[in-house]
Amino acid sequence: MDLEAALVLGKAIGAGIAGGAGMIGPGIGIGLAGLGALISIGRNPEVTSTLQTYMILVIAFAEALAIFALVISFLLLFAFQG
Amino acid sequence: MKGLRFLVLLIGSLVVGVLLSSFTLTINGIAVPFKTFIPNVVVPSEPLGPDWLHNTLFTTLIVDAVIIVLAILGARGLRNTLTGTNWFARAWEAYVEYLYNNYLVPTLGSRAKAVAPIAISAFTFIMIAGFFELLPGHESIGKIEAAPPGFRGFCAVNVGGVWLITGHEVDPAKGFEASCGYSLEQAEGKRAAAGELVASLSSDVQAAQMTAGGDPNKGAALIPFLRRPTSSLSTTLALALIAFLFIEAQGIRANGIHYFERFIQVSAWRRARQGMMQGLIGYIQSGLVGPLELISEFIRILTFSFRLFGAMFAGTVLVFVMTSILPTLLPTVMLALEFAIAVIQAFVFMMLVTVFTSLAVAHGEH
């Protein structure tokens, strides 16, 4: 296998793994944040507006990790010249 | 009845989408095949003409102009608030007061007034910059150029002086004519007969050839005029640096020199030496927590900038991919999502500035 083909293959595999595997953790995290907020709202509906703000904030933190993975996979695909 | 109309619209747009994804037109006397495609995805911003004017900077200036005009209109309305009812000024008031009362005051209390200008400005800028994805022509109207190295070149055709990219890719090994089925002269149209080779391509192309080594034979590439400023890392890094410096300044303003005690924990060290805390734990706390705090402070620049850049850039690529699959229904759904993401990311940026400022300010007060 010549170097150029190996480079393309490595890029694709690396970007796929970075994007896919990097989403697992944030997915669980966002799910947990939503679960916690929903349980709390179910028990105590008056706090909905306050909880929503904090839930979005927590989700943003978890989402940031997913976006880092996405950025790495994009950089591998489009910006990595090898 | 309403459901039926919706169904007809849905199926109709699906059919139109399938028809649009691949068709052939006769232009300049040649059959030109068109198809949907994924354009060049470029991470850094691209220069438009002069080297300092990149397309994200151009769009930043437009966003700034929009915000300034809106703000001036709102401020002019504020002058006669007492006598008349200017709906525009009222709308601005409602907007600012909603954010201020619901999000800034509960977190910051009396300090909300100092944070409000920068937090709400950042919110407005990021939100309006994000909305530029919804403008027709975003990432699709621009300067056409011979594909520079590292870009994929596409077949193009001249329709009345405007170059259209057809979506078929040019194989650099085979050249323009063998890949597209028609020559550059044919693509240019009538003027080719007079020996004037590819007029509007050629002027840009020659410049590109000299600067970037582009070759018209390798196909055309599009450099869009409009690109969301927040989909370039430079813009988001600038926003992150402003937010970071602002947060540190607020911390220093509130706590004075004691603000730095969180990084070099003098009092904890002293207490540990005096044996007031349990020996080892006190030393670990004073020696280890300080550097960790310092690192987490600087990591914020990274998270601030990469979160925004990643969300916006991923959105752009997502719309590209969806458009290449089906040009009618899917992009509409994705653009609706982009609308929401623009607001949410702006909100997250504002909230993070607020929360981090409250952390920096509150440190000395316990």
Image: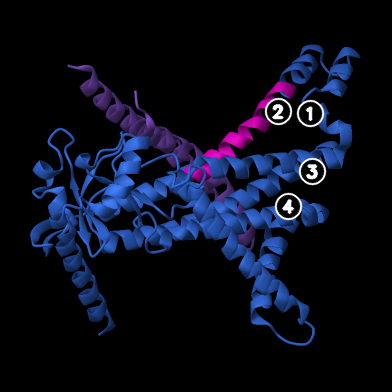
Chain colours: A purple, B blue
Same chain for marks 3 and 1? yes
The circle drawn on residue B107 is 4
Cβ atoms under marks 2 and 1 closer than 8 Å: yes
Please say if the residues under marks 3 and 2 sit with CB atoms less than 8 Å apart: no
Query: What is the spatial separation of the Cα atoms under label 2 and label 1, in whole angstroms?
Result: 7 Å
Q: Nearer the viewer, residue A3 or B329?
A: A3
Report the mark closest to the observer, 3 or 1. 3
Q: Residue at x 52, y 56 (%)?
A: B129
| Residue A15 in which image quadrant | top left
Q: Which residues lie in the magenta part? A: B290-309
Marked residue chain, label 2: B
What label does residue B346 carry, if any? none
- Which element carries disc 3, helix, strand or loop? helix
- Closest to the camera, between mark 3 and mark 4, is 3
Give the distance between the C-alpha atoms of the residues marked 2 and 4, in whole angstroms.
21 Å
Quarter of the rendering occupied by the N terminus of chain B:
bottom left
Q: CA distance from mark 4 to mark 1?
A: 21 Å
User: Label 2 crowding class (10 Å Cα cut-off): few <14, some 14-19, many 20+?
Assistant: some
Q: Earlier in the sequence, mark 3 or mark 4?
A: 4
For badge 2, the amino acid type reads: Glu
The residue pinned by badge 1 equals: B262
Considering depth in this image, is B247 or B146 the residue closer to the camera? B146
Q: Which residue is mark 2?
A: B293
Q: Residues within 10 Å of mark 4 (few under 14, many from 20)?
A: some
Residue B339, percent from left and from top: 46, 60
